[in-house]
Image: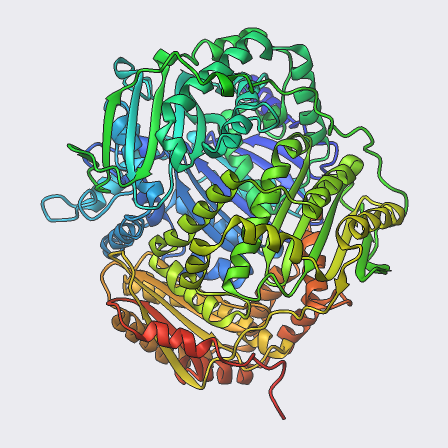
Amino acid sequence: MLGIALLSTLAVASVSPTKSPNDPNEYRYLELDNGLRVILASDPDADKAAASMNVAVGSGDDPAEREGLSHFLEHMLFLGTEKYPDPGEYQQFIRSHGGSHNAFTAFADTNYFFDVEADFLEPALDRFAQQFSHPLFTPELVDRERNAVHSEYTAKLKEDGRRFLSVRKAGGNPDHAFSQFAVGNLTTLENTEDNPLRPDLIQFWHDKYSANIMTLAVYGPQSLDQLEDMVRQRFTAIENRNLTIKTHVQSLYDNRRLPERITAESLRDSRSLTLSFPIPSQRDNYRTKPASYIANLLGHEGPGSLFDTLKKAGLVEALSAGLGMDTGEHATLDVRMSLTREGLDKQDDIIALAFRYIDQIRAKGISQQRFDEMKQLAVIDFRFRERSEPMREAMRLSSLLRDYPPADVLSAPWLMDRFAPEQYQAILDHLTPDNLKVWVSAPNRNFKTPLITKWYETQWHREPLSVPEEVDAALADQLSLPGTNPFVPENLDLVPGQSMAHPVQLGTLDGLDIWYARDTRFNTPKANVFISLRTPKARASARNEVLTQLLVDAIDTNVNAWAYSARLAGLDYSIYPHLRGVAIRVGGYNDKLHKLVNRILLEFADPDFTEQRFQIARQRLIDGLENKAKDRPVQQTSEFVQIALIDGTFPVADKLDAARGVTLAELESFGTDLVAKTDPVMLAHGNLTEASTLNMARQVQAMVLDGRERTVVDRSRIRQLPAGQAAAILNVEHPDTGYTLYLQGNNTSYEERARYRLLAQILSSPFYEDIRTTRQLGYIVYATAFEILETPALGLVVQSPESSGEAIDQAVAEFSEGFVARLNDIDSDRLQREKQAVISQLLERDRQLGEVSSRYWQEIDRGNIRFDSRERLADAIRDVTLEELQQTFREALIDRTRALRVTTGEDTDDARSTLKQLRQRAAVPDKTPG
């Protein structure tokens, strides 16, 4: 019997997951004696290690009388274990060794994760494992952490995402656990003598957490044997209580109410429409993906698609389709749309047209050719998959291991084993008018007798839905299913030659600086091309910034339908305004990349404008600007700092005035004038030859630059704060107080930047521990390096549901005074460790071509043709002395030599006058004068 059991264990352990041919990592699956399932990833080149534990317990497991308990448990597991009782020890350890950590609670899962410098994986795992085997649930911390959860709840009371979620819960099936409140607050997590919280917390942990429903992923440079040894030593201590994962047999919607429309009132000026169809769970269909096949057609954006037809009609701005929620028993297939004002008024027409498109899919959409193309793209994508950072990989693997067999855990998202028309048809059978839930959100609904959600006080309304049989014939005639994708890459060879250490300038063509770097180190036939048309007109005024944004919208709109097939085939693009003009980025498989570049340049050279599109885009821009007043308090305080100090930015009020006044004729003229004088630059990086790069450069010259003048556009700078502390109070419609303290460095030298980076590293955990955990001032609390455009700074940010701006500032001042002694006590070993933590993050190994491309592009923007900013900053960090750090701390936090404090509170004129004064200041110097 023992021999049979041993053979069984070895058989399980021998499973080798199918990996991408481009993946050099080694993987091992194993199951510990306590039933914990583990996936190990050995990446010998990794300089960071990571781990993630997924527990198949979430808010759907909360007791009805203790809503939010699983989320509260997630918070409490961080705060001390038998071996490491100090509640801040885990965070301090991770932070001091170049890492980060967090967790999230979902409906059916809670995921805990961290990353750390690779050499410290083992002690980090020791602390991590203890959280699941021997948590303390310290009594005095239980009540404190209730306040943190409550602060998290109040911080998002005014966020439409949370408010709409509360409507989805209220409007769904009341018998389903999804209907429960998931976050928790002081009411649901009551802690009194008659109803103490800690016993319920411990009982929940004991009843719900078990090794056999946990999945662990560990990623590091150590060998698989070493990783396995680390895991077995520590994680076998987690108790196996032989639990089963909770199943939710109830349907997500009350099917007796279907078809139904539910409308929720938004606070932001935005409108959305979602068609949600209940379908069976699709987890078991991961090898054929029928829902993805149908969603691919429903969400297509090419010519004749549902989206393209509706956008041309001025009814929608965005559309996507895919699985909504999947509980393992039930799921939804959702078609989500962002509406224009006219679209909101014509939502019934949109719904009718959607069903006409679904009819087309039924009649002509199921074909072997479409499947073959989708599979071919999935195979190519998996074959050339690039690795992401270790923590993201660990999170992904622990989550996938919960639902998929070990052999498929790496490949499951890309598998499309066979053409499955019967499964596609089964999905389509559920996409009917009588099996539909429509979710609508829009502002200013003025319901006569609104329903109101319990915790987020969101007004909503429900009504039976009658799907019109009549459809707009003119729109219906435009609908057509997508044809063969012309962008499927055919040549996937790598160009010959060694990867280059950094870009070189191939020359200048009509003023266009051409930078090039061949790079095949990631073994992918991909490239990225950046083209920046730097022009003084783009940011000459708030009006010009608005016109630039409208021009970019017009070009993007004109390109989108044609380019959507390119996106499906692994190409991507973006056209975006920046501080010096407008840029184009195109990336992906290089085989047909030049075709996409050409098309975008063609639109740029001769943009097409329509009155309808102009009015929609202008209104959308106005809505976005007005919605900034509804951002979180700390978002608004931090944005005030940026608008006050970044040269080339403009206040929201100025941009609103401009947006309300611009005309189509003005935009047409601006489109011609924008590139009349340019300072152009281009970078081609990746699987490209010099010849192909020069060909693209000639296209840029011929299509956009020919016959136009050249100029020089200087890089934007950060304005220097006056001596002392400037202050501003913003009037914000939110019950919480926002607080941002911006502490500016003296100059932009590498030495000054190094001191501020290191100081932020050392301050981060103690500041969080003091302000959030000990003082309980709020959920959103952090100290960070607030560096903008190489100007060093510290940012201390707090959002509090109870405290005023003055009270927060007093707490920050007390923390700063108290930290002087701690900083003085730092020994050389601790200082070296903190330096190494910063350097490890700064010099973290590149894992994807896009990371390298973006860094090269930033260096070109800086004018650093040595491409060594990271290395020079790392050298400067190594040279920082404790005395220099202490002096910087005193100047910044104690004396506040150059500080800007922005808080929210009662409306005053000081914010406007402070903003005006700061925007007239000169730039921060490169180095201290003298």
> Which residue is at a point 42% across and 16% down the rendered structure image?
279
| Residue 525 seen in the current view | no
Which corner quadrant of the image does residue 795 belong to? bottom left
Residue 848, percent from left and from top: 69, 46
| Residue 473 seen in the current view | yes
> Which residue is at a point 47% across and 52% down the rendered structure image?
101
Relative vertical location of residue 531 with respect to residue 487 in this rendering, above or below: below
Relative vertical location of residue 329 with respect to residue 52 in this rendering, above or below: above
Give the camera-side residue of 188 and 645: 645
With 382 as the anchor, is 396 left or right in this view? left
Give the camera-side residue of 475 and 571: 475
Residue 440, percent from left and from top: 34, 31
Q: Residue furthest bottom?
A: 930
Which corner quadrant of the image does residue 200 belong to? top left
> Which residue is at a point 44% across and 45% down the rendered structure image?
620
Which corner quadrant of the image does residue 790 belong to? bottom right
Q: Residue furthest front?
A: 665
